[in-house]
C-alpha cells in the first residue's frame, strides 16, 4: 500500500497512521511538517503553497517507489497540502510502516529530503511586516516581494 496525494483540505494525520497500520508492522514512522512562526529571524504569519500538480504527484510516486525499494517498506503514504495555511497547520505528512523501526524511519527521512529537492511545490511565506517571499524549499534562497 503506497499512496501519494496533494490536498487542499487539512491533513488528517491519525487517518494516515490508520491507513498504514498492520499487524505485521511493529514500527510506524511519522514525519509531520507544520507552518512555524519564524524563519531566518523573521516573524511569519502564514504560508501559501502552490504546485505544478501533475508533475508533483508523478514525482511524489517516483520518490515513494524509490523509498519502498531502498528500505523494504510496503506501507508508505505521503500527503502535501496546497493553498493558504495558518501557523501550526500541517503542510506535509509522511508515514511509513515496517516490521522494524530502522527501515520505517529511514524511509520517511528519504521521502522528505527527496520531496524538498525534487518535487515542484513552492511556498511563499507571509511575514509580520507585510512582505511575502517565495522560499526555495532546499533553503538556498528566497525572492522578496511587497504586497
Image (tube, rainbow, N blue to C red):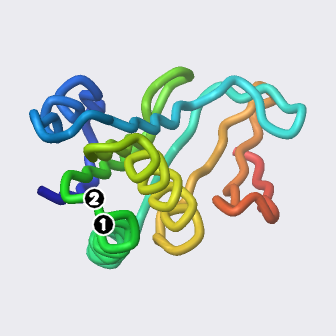
Q: Which residue is mark 2?
A: 73
Relative side of 127 to 72, left or right: right
Q: Which mark is residue 17?
A: none
Q: Residue 27, percent across and down? A: 32, 35
Dot 1 crowding, Cα within 10 Å, few <14, some 14–19, many 20+: many
Give the residue displayed 69% in from the left and 56% down from the top. Answer: 135
- Where the C terminus falls, by quadrant? top right
- State the separation of the CA atoms marked 2 and 1: 4 Å
Question: Which of these two is toward me, 21 or 80?
Answer: 21
Relative side of 120 to 61, left or right: right
Residue 54, quarter of the rendered image = bottom left
Location of residue 99 with respect to 118 vertically, above or below? above
Residue 83, quarter of the rendered image = top left
- Residues at marks 2 and 1 touching, judged by CB atoms closer than 8 Å: yes
Q: Residue 16, percent across and down? A: 22, 35
Q: Secondary structure at mark 2?
A: loop
Dot 2 crowding, Cα within 10 Å, few <14, some 14–19, many 20+: many
Q: Which residue is mark 1?
A: 68
Question: Which of these two is toward me, 132 or 77?
Answer: 77
Give the residue displayed 36% in from the left and 49% down from the top. Answer: 80
Give the residue displayed 31% in from the left and 48% down from the top. Answer: 79
Amino acid at each position: 500500500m503506497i499512496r501519494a496525494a496533494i490536498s487542499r483540505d487539512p491533513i488528517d494525520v491519525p487517518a494516515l497512521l490508520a491507513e498504514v497500520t498492520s499487524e505485521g508492522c511493529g514500527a510506524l514512522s511519522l514525519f509531520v511538517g507544520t507552518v512555524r512562526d519564524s524563519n531566518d529571524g523573521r516573524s511569519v504569519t502564514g504560508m501559501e503553497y502552490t504546485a505544478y500538480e501533475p508533475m508533483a504527484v508523478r514525482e511524489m510516486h517516483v520518490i515513494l517507489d524509490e523509498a519502498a525499494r531502498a528500505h523494504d517498506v510496503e506501507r508508505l503514504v505521503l500527503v502535501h497540502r496546497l493553498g493558504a495555511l495558518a501557523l501550526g497547520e500541517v503542510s506535509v505528512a509522511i508515514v511509513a510502516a515496517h516490521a522494524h523501526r530502522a527501515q520505517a524511519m529511514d524511509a520517511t527521512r528519504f521521502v522528505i529530503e527527496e520531496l524538498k529537492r525534487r518535487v515542484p511545490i513552492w511556498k511563499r511565506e507571509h511575514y509580520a511586516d507585510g512582505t511575502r517571499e517565495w522560499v526555495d524549499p532546499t533553503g538556498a534562497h528566497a525572492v522578496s516581494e511587497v504586497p
